[in-house]
Amino acid sequence: MEEKKQITIPTSKVQRAGKMFSAGLKVGGNYLKYYSEKIIKGDADRSALDEANAQDIYDSLSELKGSALKAAQMISMDHNMLPPAFAEKFRMAQYKAPPLSYPLVVQTFKKSLGKKPEHLFDSFSHNAVNAASIGQVHRATKKGKIFAVKIQYPGVAASVEQDLRIAMPLAAKIMNVKQKDLKQYMDEVKQKMLEETDYALELERSMKIAQACQNLPGIIFPNYYAQLSGPRVITMDWIDGLHIADWIATNPSLTDRQAIGQRLWDFYHFQIHELKLVHADPHPGNFLVTPQKDLAVIDFGCVKEIPDPFYQPFFELLQAGSTSDKKKCMELFHELEFILPTDTADEIDFFYNLLTQAVELLTKPFEKEVFDFSDVNYFNSIYRMADQLMRDPQLRRNNGARGSRHSIYIYRTYFGLYTLLHQLKAKVKTRLPVQVT
């Protein structure tokens, strides 16, 4: 059966808000059905309710595309954030979202490059090869060479700000944070999402990071073609391979999984500590494993520049054993805005204990030269702590936002990297971070 394609994207505030309202009505109907069955039968299948809600919400977010679908993709990386039905459905946003119809693709292509795809390429696939939250990829050929052409969904850039404005009250409620305290973090998210819609910036960063990382063993990057790229189109080499999750499903050997895990670790370690510029979207859809068993990095839409005033204290805190010096640790917590000048003595004591636990968990892979990311107990301890934090009454009473805005995407990067390595069941030479002076 041919895949259903989307022929339009809601772009106005009214249309997008209406789509979310419609999803809310469907979810309400699902709950009504669930409770009716519970009354009539004395019991009802909660998993069926979750599956119905996940499908209805995902269908709506898929139609909206952009920041709404991107948020679902980001949340799906967090093991503890969603019921399994939601997590499974939202993971599709990584590279299996419903694609746009070909006429819309042509329209975007003409606006960006002034010509139809068939006027620039010898062949151009009408069907998308992959589709994600911001854009979709088509396969093209020219003079015997194969290209991957990424095309941005129309209206995505214009909708980022209004989507986040609509989402902010809900995010504040979920996170138990005052909206005014959440603003600096939402500003950081907005900046990153707007950058993801800036294909000229992505093209520049892609070439810069690929050039800087070209000597890392076992890691490859596509070449990029500025003359075939524009404001909403990026053309790069086609690379044959499987996305990491699909590759893992082929049951590769432990040796091969270890090798891919090590390459992932080396790629991120080099970016963070040498470039201070990091690919901040480590999900399976952004990587391929080639038939030659190289790791191919194929998307640099989300890149975080790490400013020196943040890098120095943050990675000093991440040195193994850093929490043994309480005075120094406290200074770093203050500098990174995890402990605030307005905190009472009780609040300082509470957050110090909480933060040291979090730091010790995050830095555990750095304690030895080799760390086994297949360790289920380690990840369960992370999930347990996350669950405890969500339920802690004192934390919920203290509903002020904490931490530098720069920490959002750095934590996301580490969490995503650790999760990928856990999926690979890789044992990695972590090589302690460089000494911070």
Image: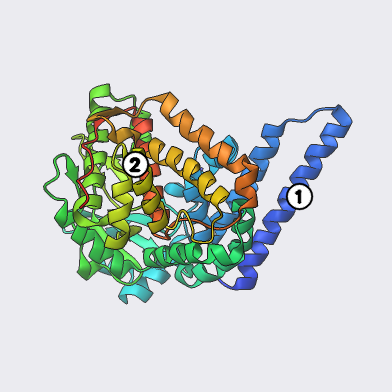
Colour treatment of the image = rainbow
Helix, strand or loop for disc 1: helix
Helix, strand or loop for disc 2: loop
Tell me the residue at 24%/67% (across/down): 228
Tell me the residue at 37%/53% (across/down): 331
Tell me the residue at 18%/35% (across/down): 292
Q: Is residue 370 above or below residue 330?
A: above
Q: Position of residue 172 (x, y in %)?
A: 61, 58
How far apart, in angstroms, are the residues tagged by discs 2 and 1? 52 Å
> Which numbered disc flags the more N-terminal residue, 2 or 1?
1
Q: Is residue 209 left or right of residue 72?
A: left
Q: Is residue 223 above or below residue 160?
A: above
Q: Which mark is residue 7?
A: none
Q: Is residue 38 left or right of residue 343?
A: right
Task: Name the residue tied to disc 1.
Answer: 28
- Neighbor class of circle 1 (other Cα within 10 Å; few <14, some 14-19, many 20+) is few
Task: Name the residue tied to disc 2.
Answer: 325
